Amino acid sequence: MDKKDYKVYTLLGDGEMPEGSNWEAALTAAHYKLDNLCAIVDKNSLQITAATADVCNTDPLDEKWKAFGWAVREIDGNDVEVLKSTLQDLPFEAGKPSVVIAHTTKGKGVSYMENVLKWHHGVPSADEYELAIKELDEALLAI
Amino acid sequence: MGIAEQNLVGVAAGLASCGKKVFATSPACFLTARALEQIKNDVAYSNNPVNVIGISAGVSYGALGSTHHSLHDYAALRAINNITVVAPADNWETEQAIELAAQTEEPIYLRFGKKPMPPLKDSTGETFAFGKGRVITEGDDVLIIACGETVYPALEAARLLKEENISATVVSMHTIKPLDTDLLAEKAGSCKAILTVEEHSIYGGLGEACASYLLQHGISKPFKIMGIPDEYTVTGSQGEILEHYGISTSGIATAAKELLR
């Protein structure tokens, strides 16, 4: 509206993709050709009660976004370098809003948390917390 | 159904219209805000007997903040025709309410908290009905009307007041709508002051429902509504938030004493 030169990012979870208001917004963004808008879907395939595909399947997610008029890229969302370079390519297509479908592992980097449903909202015990921090620190040092 | 409250209530109404017994459950904050239109039109107006179940209501989600608090649901649903609004206070009331809801062919909203609640009293021989308040303890000085998780601290406040020779009637007004106006008029008539307590905005909930009835029926006593004021709610655990707003044993007892002064 003001033709200002900035980008807007919105982070979504794959668990909330069944929510109708997301798709209302997706339609509107494409209608108004908001190519300064970028949505990132954190697709870890797990939500609070079960696997997202078992609760309400939203696959194939890329085709849904494409059908709604968005330019789509799918990446390994746990690879920060790939994420950074992907975001440097915005907009993916002139005149279209962009969406990054970031395939991620819930609890990435913490051995006992990876892909375990409980850690959607689990609270680590003191020992579990120590172990998690140790593993993450070691991973950081290895970079 | 997934994270899709409007769809949940719409599908529930459709199933109910085909004769199924339906319980549509979701956190109260999302269910009664996002899906309010479906509750109003598909359930209440269309008279589809859906049991709309709001869980972790009030400030149960504590530190998750305003997005996850439901402090508007009594107000929103009270203003909608043809839906019963119920907030049980202990396990007995909860069990009774669910069983009764399953047998009742009309739109019902059941509001549950998250925290385990102790029994309010021995329920042997008691009967439960929507629209009939439950007298937990009786006294002459102050009438405390509460619902949901606030009944227990109200009862504890009554015990505290008793140590100072102040006697209180505590009513678990589990049905916010239709309100048990017979019980309200009877107990309000025989006390010196009236305190209402709810885990909801002070606007549009149990307190204003009671005040409206009493004022329009010529019953005037010192009166106070305890609830969450109209401000950005403080952040903390459920207990910390309620304590902050005086919805605690000592806070309720203090408010009762101030009313009686």
Image (cartoon, coloured by chain):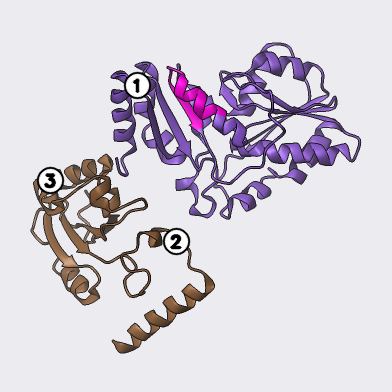
Chain colours: A brown, B purple
Q: Is residue B115 left or right of residue B73?
A: right
* Chain designation of label 1: B
* Chain designation of label 3: A
Disc 3 versus disc 1: nearer the observer: 1
Q: Nearer the viewer, residue B96 or B229?
A: B96
Q: Is residue A84 left or right of residue B128?
A: left
Q: Residue at x 19, y 43 (%)?
A: A28
Both on one chain, marks 3 and 2?
Answer: yes
On whether residue B105 falls in the magenta region, the answer is: yes
Work out how far the residue at label 2 is from the one at label 1, CA to CA, in angstroms.
37 Å
Mark 1 and mark 3 in contact (Cβ < 8 Å)?
Answer: no
Residue B76, can we see it?
Answer: no
Locate residue B238, reporting x and y percent. Answer: 59, 50
Disc 2 versus disc 1: nearer the observer: 2
Both on one chain, marks 2 and 1?
Answer: no
Which residue is label 2 attached to?
A: A122
Q: Residue at x 35, y 59 (%)?
A: A117
Give, as a single range, the part of the protein colored magenta: B96-110
